[in-house]
Image (tube, grey):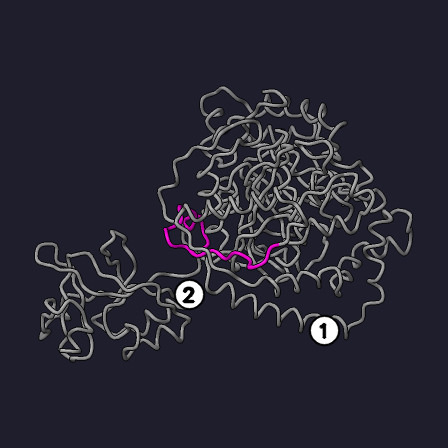
Amino acid sequence: MNQHSFDLRLGTLATGYRDGRLTPRALMAELRQRASALNPEYQLFIHILTAEEQEPWLAALDGVSPETLPLYGVPFAIKDNIDLAGIVTTAGCPAFAYTAERDATIVAQLIALGAVPVGKTNLDQFATGLNGTRSPYGRCRNAVHPAYPSGGSSAGSALAVALGVASFALGTDTAGSGRVPASLNNLVGLKASKGLISTAGVVPACRTLDCTTFFTATAAESSRLLALTAAVDPRDAYSRRNPQWNGAQAFGAPASGFRFGVPQTLNFLGCAQSEALFLQAKARLLALGGVAVSIDMAPFLAAASLLYDGPWVAERYAVAGPLIERQPEAVLPVIRDVLAKAPQTDAVAAFKAMYQLQAYKAQCDALLDGVECVLTPTYPRPVTLAELEAEPVKRNADLGYYTNFMNLLDYAAVSVPTGFLSNGLPSGVTLFGRVFTDQYLLGLADAFQRALPLPLPGGAQIAPEPPAAAASHDRQALVVCGAHLDGLALNGQLRERGGRLLTATESAACYRLYALADGRRPGMVRDESGGAAIAVEVWELPSAELGSLLAAIPAPLGLGKVELADGRWLSGFICEAYGLQGATDITAYGGWRAWLAR
């Protein structure tokens, strides 16, 4: 491998280890050399781990079959606000530095899975910035173009993957720090739902908003990492249980007809090329079978303004403030300027801002209720290093135009590459959606990557074949054939649970329909030899509500799998055979409505 040609994807390394072409020690030695060679120019590492520091993890892999650990020998980089036991954590500030006594939970998880740390990466000081230049350890330039920044605050983490010294990297994201660097360096950046990935052992930026993130070459790799690490952590009071519908099985190919929001008005800050790439991304989703839905971005952007103009800046001050008060020269001037108003923030203002945020969230949630996700640019336009030097606060804010609202509103998001500007600089778009729809978003991002395979970091290509499974999310499709049809007696049971009619269609031509003995309900039974197509409706119900509906269904009816005319098998109402005693075969009517109207 050389600086410009590499393939460190999880699957590639797994194959190399199984075949015996790679060993963890040999790979780590090569990556240490590469990191040392790259660091003077890119300033991506604050600390590159030595062979002696890596040895305990490599020794633990000796004699272990690569088949037994899902991340056997996989190199990963750690943003230097995340603890690695025995190694100094700086948060980008030497005066703040301390030696970590134990691993951050996410680091411990990854090491237990077989992964090996490569080093601690550079960042905007106290994770306050979106550009990668606010560090006393050196400014991070872009992986592709020397006149542009890496993006931040997870600057070095993005560069570690983009430049081929790690298969994936850990970052953090409060205002966009896990997405902006991904977009600027041709990477996938997963900002999972708050609390899914533990933040125990992470130096806080805004404790109530912080997320630990992954940088990867592909969405499929982020999906796998999330599935391996999403777990409740007793060390993290903000940790949340990952619902079953957001597990590994939810990653897959999106079904045709998915709805994606597109902002009615978009601001690219004058960059025509960014606009063109966004329109290409929209066209790609349409070609995948998506349906574009126009949405108003005003409440999202209004919420974003609260992050730095509101009291949340005081939450950042809770970490850096004591050092600023004791030793102001130890903190970069731009960081001090950003946090300057924090001490004047009072409790009344904080509560007023929380009330305002909740009002915005109610509006935004209502907009997201009608779509599977929303498509936005990750950044409106790139800014140069020279622009950042001239106007450090304003140009940093430009990069966060479409990212700052995400954690305030508690949404999941993934940035995915969409192409390159004429000067070669990468650009990306963000897919965001309701909390705990992370794996669905990653499935859509995966389809997006495969639809127009861009070169991956190092020059590798993504395989065009989609995953065999279908993507799923927090809503469950439900086939109804009787009293739950739109406007009929029991339809209220669906609507009061947040149900929404998707389509009226027919079953496959292999069912019989019976009016049960009570005369109030039908029963649909599969009959391969003498069946017919039955009129049905497909509704969508929040997965969290499905259990209560199932409990309310009286015998002999229940839920099972129903085949539709288009070949899909969906959950739906079925009838047990014993319930047909005394029932009337009404298959000839073609559906329950026709029977009622006879």
Disc 1 crowd rating (10 Å Cα; few below 14, some 14-19, many 20+) is: few
Q: Which residues are magenta?
A: 246-266
Question: What is the three-letter code of the residue carrying label 2?
Answer: Pro
The image shows residue 20 at horizontal and vertical percentages of 48, 20
Residue that appears at 61% across and 35% down? 76
Circle 2 crowding by C-alpha within 10 Å: few under 14, some 14–19, many from 20: some
Q: Residue at x 56, y 49 (%)?
A: 430
Q: Which mark, residue 16? A: none
Asked if 16 appears above or below 317 in the picture, the reply is: above
Q: Quadrant of the C terminus?
A: bottom left
Q: Position of residue 458 (x, y in %)?
A: 57, 27
| x then y, percent, for residue 368 | 51, 63
Name the residue that disc number 1 marks. 351
Helix, strand or loop for disc 1: helix
In the rendered image, is residue 237 in sight? no
Asked if residue 278 lies in the magenta stretch, the reply is: no
Which residue occupies 64% across, 61% down?
A: 301
Q: Which percent across, then down, holds residue 306?
A: 71, 64
Label 2 – label 1 distance at C-alpha: 31 Å
Position of residue 517 relative to residue 74, above or below, is: below
Residue 428 visible within the image: yes
Q: Look at mark 2 in the image and give the residue it sits on.
A: 542
Question: N-terminal of the two: label 2 or label 1?
Answer: 1
Q: Nearer the viewer, residue 543 or 444?
A: 444
